[in-house]
Amino acid sequence: MSLFPEIIRIMAYVVGVLAFVGLNAAFLVWLERKVAGHIQRRIGPKEVGPFGVLQPVADGIKLISKQLVVPAQADSLLFRLSPVLTMTLAVTVFVVLPFGPSLVARDINIGLLLIFAFLSINVLALFIGGWGSNNKYAVVSAIRAVSQNVAYEVPMLIIVITMVMITSSMNLNVIVSQQGNLLQWHIFPWNGSILSPLAFLIFFVCTLAETNRAPFDLGEAESELVAGFHTEYSGMGFGLFFLGEYASVFVGCALASILFLGGWQCPLGIMPGVHWMLIKTYLLVFVVIWVRWTFPRTTLYGLLNLSWKVLVPFSLVILLVTAAQLKMPWPF
Amino acid sequence: MMPLFTVEGLAGLLFFVFVLLIILGALAATHAADLIRAVSGLALCMVGVAGIYYFLGSPFLSLMQILIYAGAICIAIVFAVMLAEPQGVRKFRRRHPIAGAGGLVASALLTWGLASLALKTAWPQAPEQINPGALEDVGRAMVTTFLVSFELISLVLMIVIVGALVLARQGRSRAGPEKSSNS
Amino acid sequence: MEIPIIYNSLSTYLLIAAVLFGFGIYGIIKHRSLVGILISAELVLAAASINFMAFNRFLAPDPVIGQMFALFIMGLAAAKAVIVLSIIVVVYRNYKSIDPEDTAELAG
Amino acid sequence: MSGYFKEIYDGGKSLLVGMGITFRYMVQPVVTLQYPHETVPMTPRFRGHIDLACDQAGNHKCIVCGTCQRNCPSGCISLKGEKPEGAKKKLLIAYQLDFTKCSLCGTCVESCPTDALIFSKNYNLAGLSGQEFILDLLKRQEERSK
Amino acid sequence: MVTANAHLPIVHFSSLDKLLNLGRANSLWPLTFGLACCAIEMMATGVARFDLDRFGMGVFRPAPKQSDVMIVAGTISKKMAPGIRTLYEQMPHPKWVIALGNCAIAGGPFVFAGQYGIVEGADKIMPVDIYIPGCPPRPEALVEGLLLLEEKLTGSRRWPRVNPE
Amino acid sequence: MSDLAVDPSCETFVLNMGPQHPATHGALRIKLVLDGEYIVEAEPVLGYIHRMHEKMGENRSYLAFMPNTGRLDYLSALSYNHGYVSVVERAAGIAIPERAEYLRVITVELNRISSHLLWLGAFVLDLGGFTPLLYTMDDREQLLDLLESVTGSRLTYCYFRFGGLYNDVDDNFGPGARAFIKRMRRRLPMYHKLISKNVIFRQRLEGIAPVSAEMCRKYGATGPVARGSGIAYDVRKHEPYSVYPEFNFDIPVYEQGDSMARYLIRMDEIEQSLRIVEQGLDKLPPGPIMAVKVPKIIKPPKGDYYMAVEAARGSFGIRLVSDGSATPYRLKLRSPCLSNLSLFGEAARGLLLPDAVAFFGSLDLVIPDIDR
Amino acid sequence: MKKLAISQALAALASARVLECDHASRGFHLSVAVAPLELPAAAKILDQQGFFIEAITGVDWLGEQAAPGPTVADQAEHQPPLPSEDSFEVVYDFNHFAKLCRVALRTRMPRSRPEIPTISAIYPGANWHERETHDFFGIIFSDHPDLSPLLLPEDADFHPLCKDYKP
C-alpha cells in the first residue's frame, strides 16, 4: 500500500470539505438574508459587493477580528470546547455525503449510521456551550435544546429505519443509485412504502427541529432567552456556531434529498451529477428559510406535544405499514 | 516498530490517539468535580472506545458505541443532572481524601492484577485472520442464533421505559411543585 | 521516525480494558454523587465490552459473537442508565440531594 | 379521534396558507426606498430645526422681540440684538439654536409676530460631536442668501 | 532604500488594517436596545422602508457580546445609566456608540433647572462616536449616522451625499 | 417519607429580564422567580426611563408642557395631546370650533391605528415571528406619511393647541386618508389569515393568562385589556368627549380574557377606527380651526380638574390642580400602562416563560408612559 | 343611580363631606373628603359598589397656598379642618365600569406627620400608586407591604414633587 497518494487524497478531502462548509455557510447567510428580505418586501444585503454577495465576507472578517471574551463566571474549558466541537461534528458528517456518483470523501457501508452517530453528539456540544457559559439564559436554552433534540430524534430515526428497510442499505450512494429517475424517487408511494410522502414530511419537520431552526428555534428564542446558548459568545465563537448551524441545515436537507429525492440523480434520468444534488438540497434549504420567516415560534410544550402525540405515532404507523408491505406485497 | 509514515505507522499513531482519548476521558470522568465535565469526559472516553472497536474490525459497533453512549446515555445523564442539580450548587464536595486514596489503591491493585493476568496468560494463537463480521451477518445472527437474547433485551428495555416513567411520575406527584396552570 | 505497532496483539486490548476497568472502580469509590457513580459504572461496562470484542477478534472463530455481546451490553447499559437516572431524579425530588451519604442519613 | 385528525389537518392548512402569503409577498416588488440613492419626498410641513426665513431680498425678518426665546419650552433659543446708534429698531447680531435640546414643538414658529422663523428641511443630520448642532442661525441665513 | 524596506511591514499592516476596517464597517451589528421614543424610529429604520440590511447593518443582536454598535435611542435616566455602562463594557472590542436623538446627545427636552432624574447625554457615561440630533430623528438621519460611522472607519464615503434643501 | 419538608427555594432561581431585553420593549426590568420554566413570582421593576414629566408640568407654562404630552406614550401621542388640551380647555373654559374637533378625532384615530399596527408587529415579534412586523410597519409608514403631512412629525406629535389646532390639513389629506382606509381594509383579512388563523399562534395565545373582569377592576386596568375581559368600558362611549357622540362605532368586547382576546380586540379596534375616520372625513365641516378668543397666557381658575380620554392603551387621565397662575400647580398623569402592568405580577404566576412573554406583549405597554 | 347610592353610602362615614360637582366643567361627579383614618372604610364602600381605581395623586399644599384653602370656594367648606397648616392632600380617583360616576376621594394630613393608612389590601392596584406617591412626596402609607421606591432609584431618599424640594 503506497502511502502518499492516500495522504494527499485525505488532505484533499479535508480541504475540500472545509472549503465547502465555509462556502456553504457564506452562501446560506447571504441566501437567508436575501430571501428574508424579499419575503419582507425589502432588498436585503445589497451595497456590499454586487447584490451584496460580499456581505458574508465582511461579516466573517468582522467576526474574526472581534475580541473573544470568555466571561469570568464561565467554565472556560467547556466554553471554548463547545463551538469547536459543534463545528467539527458538522464537518465530519460531510465526509460520507455523496455529492455525485464518485464525489464522496469516504464511501462507507454504514454512512447513514455515521451521520446519526455524529449528529447525536451535536446536542451535547450545544449543551456544554450553554452550561459552560454559566449564564441563566444560556442554561435554560441548553436545557430546551436537549429536550427538543431528544424528542425529535425518535421519529427521525424511526423514519430512517423505514427508509433503510425499503432500500435495504445504509450506504448513501447505494440509496441514491436506486432512484434513477423521477418516478423511482422514494418520496412517491409506489416505491417502497405507500406512506412515504408522509415520511418525507415527518423527516423534514424533524430536520427543522434537530437543526434548531424556526419554528423550533427555542434554543435561541430571542424574545425570551436573549440569544440562547450563545448569549455569552462573541466574535468567532459565535461565528463557529453559525457555521455549524448552517452546515447541519445543509446536512439535514442533503439527507432528505438523498433518502427521498434521489440525491445526485436527475429527475429525467440523464446527466446525473453534483449539480442535481446541490439544486435539490438548496431548494430544501430555501423551504427551511421560507418556513423560518413565516411562522412564529412554538413553545417547548407545543413542540413536545407535536413530537410525542403526532410525529412519533405517525412514524410508527409508517414503520409498521412499510414492514407489512415489504413482507406481504399482495394487498398493495 | 514501524516507520511512522506508512499506512500501518499512521494507523498505529491513530491507535495511540484513541488510547489517549480513553485515558483522558476516563480521567475527566472520574476526577472532574463538575458533573457536566464528567459527562463530557465520559463522551470523550466513549469516542475513544469506539475507535478501539474500529481497530477490532467492527466499524458498525464503533458507530453504535458513539450513537448509544455519546448520543443517548450521555444525554440522559445530562438530563438527570439538569433535573437533579440545583442551579446554585454546581460543584460537589470531594469525598474524604482517605476514601479517594483507598479507591486509588484498590483500583490500582485491580488493574495490576488484571493486567498481569492479561500479559502472563498464554493465549492460544488466533486461528487465522478472520474476516470482520459484516453488518448483514450481525443482523442475521440477531434474529436467528441470538433471537432469545435479542427479545429479552427488548423486553428489558420495554420494562425499563415503563419503570422509568412510573418512577418519574411518582416523584412528580409527591414533591413536584403545583402545576395548576394551563397545559 | 518509528512507532510501535501494538494494535495487532490481544494483550494491548486487554491492558486497555484493565486500565478502563480500574478507572471505573476508582471513580465508583471516589465520586460523591450518584450521577458520578453512574458515569464510572459506564466505564466498567465499556471495559467489559472491549474484552469481549478483543477475544472475539483474536480467539473466536465466529466473527459475530463478540459484536452481539457488545451490542447486548450497550442495550443493558442504556437500560441501566435510564433506570438509575430516573431513580436519581426521584431521590433528588425527595431528598434534594444526589449525594449517596445524604440519602443514607435521611433514610435512617 | 376525528378531532385529532381534524386538528392536524386544520393546523397544517393554516401553515400552508401562511406560507402562501409570504411567498406571494416575496415575488412582489420591494417597498424599500434606497435612501442615499433615492430620497423620500419631504412634506412641506416637515419640522426640521428652525431657520430664519429669507424674504425676496435675502434678508431675515427678525425684529429681536424675544418672543421665541421666552416661549421655548426647553430654552434652546438665545438671541442677541443691538441698537446701533441712531437706528430705530434693534438689529439681530446673534441667533443661536441649541438643537440638541429642541423638541420640535413649533411654539417659536407659531408665536413669532413677524413670521421670521421657518422649519428647515434638514432631515438627515448626523455629526461627530454634539457641539455641531448648536447652530448659528444668523450665519446659516447669511450663507443661504448669498 | 533602507528606509523604504523599513516601511514595508507598516504598509502591510495598514493594508490589513484597511481590510479589517472595511469588513467591520460593512457589518455593523447593532444591539437591540431601545429606551424611548427614538427606539421606534430605530425600528422604523430597520424595517422594509429603509432597510438597514442593505448595508449589512440589519442584524440586530439581542446580546451585547455579539454586537458592534450600541445605538443609544432615548433618554438615559440615572437609574438606567449603570446598566447602559455595563452593556457597553460587555460589548467586545472594537465597539462604537451612536447617540440617537436629542435626549442621548444632551438630555434633550428633559433638561431643566432642578432636574433630578436623567443623565444629560450619553457621552457623560461612555465615549460616543456619532451624534444624530432630532426629536426623534427621521430614519434617514440614522442611516446617515451609520454611513458617517462607516466613513469614520474607512476614511471614505461610498455613497452619494444627500442635500435635503 | 411524605412528611419530609421540601424547601421550595431549592428548585427556584431568579432571572432578571431586562432592563435590556428584547421582550420588554424598552427599559423595564422584570424580576422573575422561576421553577424550571414556570414562573413562581414576577415583579416588574420600574423607573428606568423616569423622565420627570410631572415635575416638568409644575415648572413650565401650560403651553410649554405640550411637547411633553407627545413623549409620554409616544405611540399614540395625539391622544395624549388631546387629553391635555382638553383638560386645559375644560379648566379655562375655552370652546373649540367644530372643524378642529373633527380633525382632532380623525388624527387621533389614525394615530390609534398606527399604534395598534406597531403593537401587532412587536407582539408577533415577541412570539418569534419576524415577518409580520415588517408588513405592519409598511402599513404604518403609509400612515405616518399621512400624519407627517398634517403635523410635521412622525412620532412625537405636538399638533393640538388650546382652542384648536396648529394648522389645518391640506387638500391631499382627505384622498390620502381614504386611500389608506381602502388599503387597510384589504390588509386586515391578510393579517387574519397570516396571524390569527395560524395554528402555532393560536396555540400560544388561546387560554393563556386569563385576566378576569374582577382583576381588571381591582387593578384599574382599562382599554383593550379590560375589554378583552368582558368589560365594555371605553371612555369614548362611556364618558363621551370631543365629537365622539357624532360617530357611529362599536366597542369590541371579548369575554375570554386570554391573550387571544386582547389580540382580537385590537384587531377589531383598527377596523372601528377606520370607520370613525371614514365618517369623520365625510362629515368634516368647513370653518376655522382655532377658537377666536384664546388668551395668550392661559390662567385657569383655582380648583382641580380631571379629564380622561381613550388612548390606544386605555384610559389616560389628567388631574390638573390650578392655583390660578400661568403654571399648573400640580399635574397628575394617569397612565393606562401603569395600571395594566400592575396586574402582570398576579396574572403571570404559574405561566411558562414563553407564555409570560406572550402575555406581556398582549398587554401592549409603552414603558416611558409607565415611568413618566 | 350610582351617584346617589355612593354619595349616600359615603356620607354615612363620620368625617366624610360629600360634594357634587359639575362633570362638564370639573371632570368628576363627586368630591368626597374624608379623614385619613376613615380612608380604608371609604375605599371598602367604593369597592363594594363595584368601582375601580384610576389613580392616586398627592398634592403638596405649602406656604401661602395652604393658608386660604387653595381649592375652589366650594371645597373650602367641606374640607376637614386643617386650615392654616402646611399639608399634603392625597386624591384617589375612582370610576365605575358600567355607570359613569367619577369619585374623587380626598384626604389631608399635616405635612409634619405625613402618614395615612394604605388601601392596597382592598385594591391591589393601589399598591403601585401609593408607592409612587411615597416616592414623590414622602407620604407614608402605613401597613403598605413594600414602600421601596417605584420610579426613583432604589436608594433615592428625596421626594422631588414636594414644593420645597431642592436638587
Image (cartoon, rainbow, N blue to C red):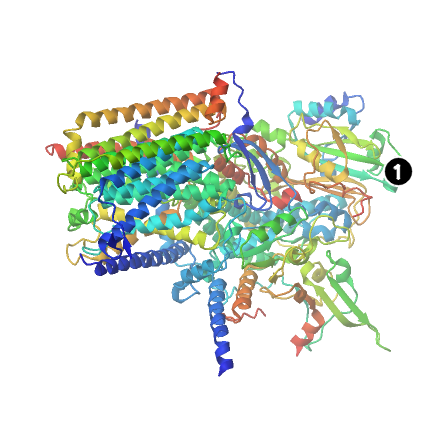
Evaluate whether residue G55 shows in this view: no
Direction from residue G108 to residue A216 in the image, left or right: left
* The one of E120 and F175 positioned closer to us in this rendering: E120
Residue A85: x percent and y percent?
38, 48
**SS class, disc 1:** loop
Q: Amino acid at mark 1?
A: Ala
Residue in front for this viewpoint, G155 or F202: G155
Mark 1 Cα shell of 10 Å, populated few (<14), some (14-19), many (≥20) = some
Q: Is residue A133 left or right of residue F170?
A: left
At a point 30% along the width and 39% down the height, the residue shown is C16
Q: Where is residue F152 drawn, in percent x and y?
A: 61, 59
Q: Can you tell which quarter of the image residue A58 is in?
A: bottom left
Image side of residue G13 versus residue A251, left or right: right
The residue marked by circle 1 belongs to what chain?
Answer: G
Q: Is residue B33 visible?
A: yes
Give the percent coordinates (x, y) of residue A106: 23, 52
- Give whichever of D113, B52 is nearer the camera: B52
Residue with the most extreme bottom position: E1
Figure quadrant of the C terminus of chain F: top right
Number of marks present in the image shown: 1
Residue ranking furthest to the front:
B120
Which residue was labeled with disc 1? G67
x and y, in percent, of residue B7 in the image? 22, 54
From the viewer's side, name the closer residue of F19 and D1.
F19
Name above or below for residue C91 compared with residue C20: above
- Above/below status of F344 relative to A133: above
